[in-house]
Amino acid sequence: MNLILLGPPGAGKGTQAKILEEQYGLKQLSTGDMLRAAIAAGTETGLKAKAIMDKGDLVSDDVIVGIVSERLDKPDVAKGVVFDGFPRTPAQAEALDKMLAGRGSKLDAVIEMRADDEALVGRIAGRFTCKTCGKSYHDKFQPTKKPGVCDNCGGTEFVRRADDNEKTVRDRLQVYNRQTAPLVSYYAKAGKLSVVDGMAEIGAVTASIAKVLNGVAKG
Ligand code: ADP
Ligand code: AMP
C-alpha cells in the first residue's frame, strides 16, 4: 500500500508516519529528512538545498523528483511507502503518479491532516527529534517518557531543526497554502482523498488514519 500524508508543517505527518511504519510495515519516505541527510553528508544537493530550506522555500521539483525516484528503486519499499512531505507541488504529484506507474505500482490513499495555523506554530516551536531514529517529540505535547532518552531507540542525543523558528514556520505555512494546498483538489478529483482532524490527540489521529486505511484495504 502506498499513501501520502498531506498537511502543513507540524500537522503530525512524521509522527504518524513512524507509527504506520510499525503498524503496517510500510516505509516512511520523508523528502525533508532526505535533504537534511544530504546537508549532513555535505553533498552538492545538500549544499544547494540548505539555503532554500533555511528560508522555508521549496527545493526545485527536479531535485526532489530525482531523490524520490532513486529511493523508490531500493528494495525496502516493496511493502509500500508513506510519503511524508512529498509531493508538495502539482508537478511533483504528476511525477509521482508516473514514477509509481513505471514501477507497476499506484497510490492507494491520500490523507489530508488539517490543523489550525496557530496550533502549528506552537507545535513546531516545541519540536525536537531523536538524532538516531528520527522520532519526533514535543516539549509539552509529547515529551520522552524518561527525560533525555528516546522511547523508541534509547538514543540520548536530540536535535532541533534550524528552520523550526516562528518566522520560518510562518513563511512555510504560506508556502504550503500557496504551492501545496492545490494538491487537495488534485487528489479529491482522483477519488483518493480522505481528511482527518490533525488537531486531535496523537492516538485519536492514528485511529482516524487506521479507519481510512481499513476502508482502502476493503476496496
Ligand atoms: P510534521 O511531520 O507534519 O511537520 P511532526 O509529526 O513532526 O509534524 O509534529 C510536529 C510537532 O507536533 C512534534 O513536536 C510532535 O511531537 C507534535 N505533534 C504531532 N502530532 C500531534 C498532535 N496530534 N497533538 C499535539 N502535538 C502533536
Ligand atoms: P519538512 O521536513 O517536510 O518540513 O521539509 C523541510 C524543508 O525541506 C522544506 O521547507 C523545503 O525547503 C524542503 N523540502 C522538503 N520536501 C520538499 C519537497 N517535496 N519539495 C520541495 N522542497 C521540499
Image (cartoon, grey):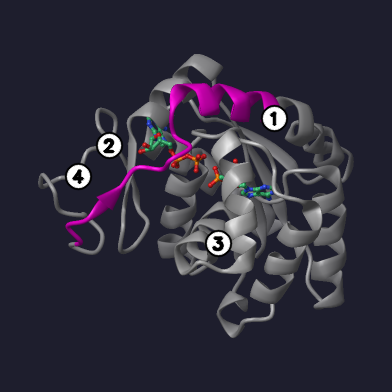
Picture quadrant of residue 134: bottom left
Q: Residue furthest bottom?
A: 75
Q: Amino acid at mark 3?
A: Met
Q: Mark 2 or 1, which is nearer the eye?
A: 1
N-terminal-most mark, 1 or 4: 4
Q: Is residue 99 shown left or right of residue 175?
A: right
Q: Which residue is mark 2?
A: 142
> What is the CA distance from the residue labelled 3 to the residue labelled 4?
24 Å
- Quadrant holding the N terminus: bottom right
- In whole angstroms, how far apart are the C-alphas of marks 3 and 2? 24 Å
Disc number for residue 175: 1
Distance CA(mark 2)–CA(mark 4): 7 Å
Does residue 175 belong to the magenta stretch? yes
Q: Amino acid at mark 2?
A: Gln
The part of the chain drawn in magenta is 155-176
Report if the beta carbon of the residue with label 2 is closer than 8 angstroms to ligand 1.
Answer: yes
Q: Residue at image x 32%, y 42%?
A: 128
Q: Which mark is residue 34?
A: 3
Residue underneath mark 4:
144
Q: Is residue 57 left or right of residue 101?
A: left
Whether residues under marks 3 and 2 lie with C-beta atoms below 8 angstroms apart, the answer is no
Horizontal placement of 20 versus 188: left or right?
Answer: left
Residue 1 appears in the figure: yes
- The response on whether ligand 2 sits within 8 Å of label 1 is yes
Indicate the secondary structure of the residue bearing disc 1.
helix
Is 191 magenta? The answer is no
Structural distance between the alpha carbons of marks 2 and 1: 26 Å
Mark 4 nearby-residue class (10 Å; few <14, some 14–19, many ≥20)? some
| Residue 52 drawn at (x, y percent) | 64, 43
